[in-house]
Image (cartoon, rainbow, N blue to C red):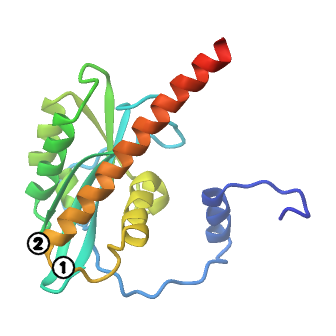
């Protein structure tokens, strides 16, 4: 690629390979967490090809599974698309609507700009389309947005956070129990907050140095 002077990002490169059927098929040994075969209202995709320009402009939500020695657990995440900070999460042994509602409740408690307009983007799984979830979100001033089809590239930030958790924080492995998995997720959340704080103060320091 370099010898041909071609510059292309990772996500765009994968989309190119995918469009031309050049990707190696994955083994279908994953655990499905999205069920979009339901009669609930499905919202339009409001964020396609849009990039957030500030924190709490766009939240992305998703569910992933974590294997434990006692069986599968399910992790609902709400992530700020701009800062990549996990705003809220809930880990339990079920995929009920309450799993996602509890994650969103935590995210709302962690809001720093509650008066700013915000969009919530997710897949079309029954948990996110259920009125118990959508009505709770809209009552808190959140605008709903959803993927138009089952394509991970329509929710890339959420998918990337899931991948980071599993491959960089060892949640891909079989965890001893739910309690340990919760501690590992909390460590990831705390780490992202620490990185954001360091980045913020370093940016302020560099701005001050450059202005002098």
The answer to whether residue 179 is visible is: yes
Pointer 2 residue: 93
Q: Position of residue 45 (x, y in %)?
A: 40, 44
Quadrant location of residue 46?
A: top left
Q: Position of residue 104 (x, y in %)?
A: 18, 45
In front of the other: 200 or 33: 200
Residue at the spot 44% in from the left edge and 52% down from the top edge: 157
Secondary structure state at the residue bearing disc 1: strand
Q: Is residue 118 left or right of residue 202?
A: left
Residue at the spot 59% in from the left edge and 20% down from the top edge: 207
How far, Cα to Cα, is label 1 from label 2?
A: 6 Å
Residue 176, numbered label: none
- The reply to whether the C-beta atoms of the residues labelled 1 and 2 are less than 8 Å apart is yes
In front of the other: 30 or 54: 54
Q: Is residue 170 left or right of residue 99?
A: right
Quadrant location of residue 187?
A: bottom left
Residue at the spot 30% in from the left edge and 51% down from the top edge: 189
Q: Position of residue 59 (x, y in %)?
A: 33, 41
Residue at the spot 26% in from the left edge and 54% down from the top edge: 77
Q: Is residue 140 left or right of residue 195?
A: left
Pointer 1 residue: 72
């Amino acid at each position: 690629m370099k010898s041909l002077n071609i510059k292309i990002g990772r996500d765009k490169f994968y989309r190119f390979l995918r469009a031309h059927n050049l990707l190696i098929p994955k083994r279908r040994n994953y655990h499905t967490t999205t069920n979009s075969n339901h009669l609930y209202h499905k919202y339009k995709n409001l964020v396609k090809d849009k990039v957030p320009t500030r924190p709490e402009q766009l939240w992305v939500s998703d569910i992933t599974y974590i294997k434990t020695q006692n069986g599968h657990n399910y992790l609902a995440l709400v992530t700020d698309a701009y800062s990549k900070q996990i705003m809220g999460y809930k880990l339990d042994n079920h995929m009920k609507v309450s799993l996602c509602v509890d994650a969103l409740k935590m995210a709302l408690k962690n809001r720093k700009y509650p008066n700013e307009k915000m969009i919530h983007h997710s897949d079309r799984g029954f948990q996110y389309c259920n009125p118990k979830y959508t009505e709770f979100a809209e009552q808190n001033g959140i605008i709903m947005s959803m993927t138009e089809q089952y394509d991970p590239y329509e929710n890339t930030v959420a998918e990337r956070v899931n991948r980071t958790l599993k491959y960089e924080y060892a949640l891909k492995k079989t965890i001893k129990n739910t309690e340990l998995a919760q501690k590992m997720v909390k460590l990831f959340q705390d780490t992202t907050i620490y990185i954001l704080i360091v980045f913020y103060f370093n940016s302020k320091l560099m701005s001050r140095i450059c202005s002098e």
